[in-house]
Image (cartoon, helix red, strand yellow):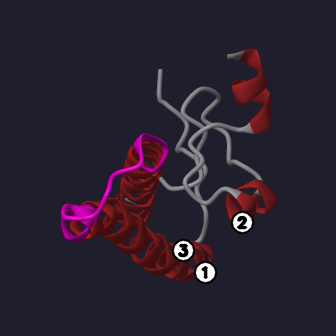
Amino acid sequence: MMEEPRKRYSDEDLEEFRALILEKLEKANKEYELLVDSAVGDEDTDAGIGAQKHNIFEDSTTAAQRAEAERLAERQRQFIQKLQAALVRIDNKTYGICRVTGELIPKDRLRAVPHATLSIEAKSKK
């Protein structure tokens, strides 16, 4: 039995999504750098305070802020990886195809979540 060819987005559509993803990737990389700088930057300012009297509450706040910046940076790094994976799917011409149903994910969903690999229906069944 012959398998029916998979539906896919046109090359023109894929280029539209590539531009959208590249734009989001540029912003995401800048945000990631800021988060990493803020996590590392807090450590640098701690060293200069060394001679001053330490307040235990300030120390715990700084540690909590650093931990939060690290958590957000990790989340941003994962987002960047998902966007990069979406670019690979564009190159492979498999972008926008639901992993579960094999159907095209609606353009509106991909514009909102360009790294999506599941249609709303498939995601809600999960």
Between circles 2 and 3, the one closer to the viewer is 3
Mark 2 or mark 3: name the one nearer the start of the chain: 3
Q: Viewed as shown, does residue 123 lie left or right of 58?
A: right
Is 51 in the magenta? yes
| Residue ID for mark 3 | 24
Q: Height in image: 32 above or below 69?
A: below
* Quarter of the picture holding the C terminus: top right
Near-viewer residue (88 or 20): 20
Mark 1 or mark 2: name the one nearer the start of the chain: 1
Amino acid type, callout 2: Arg
Near-viewer residue (54 or 116): 54
Amino acid type, callout 1: Glu
Label 2 Cα neighbours within 10 Å, binned few <14 / some 14-19 / many ≥20: some
Query: What range is drawn magenta here?
Result: 46-58
For numbered disc 3, what is the local secondary structure? helix
The residue sitting at the front extreme is: 53
Q: Height in image: 57 above or below 100?
A: below
Cβ atoms at labels 3 and 1 below 8 Å apart? no
Label 3 vs label 1: CA separation?
13 Å
The label number, if any, that marks residue 16 in the structure image? 1
Q: Position of residue 80 (x, y in %)?
A: 41, 60
The label number, if any, that marks residue 111 in the structure image? 2
Mark 3 or mark 1: name the one nearer the start of the chain: 1
Near-viewer residue (22 or 46): 46
The residue sitting at the top extreme is: 126
For numbered disc 2, what is the local secondary structure? helix
Q: Position of residue 58 (x, y in %)?
A: 46, 50
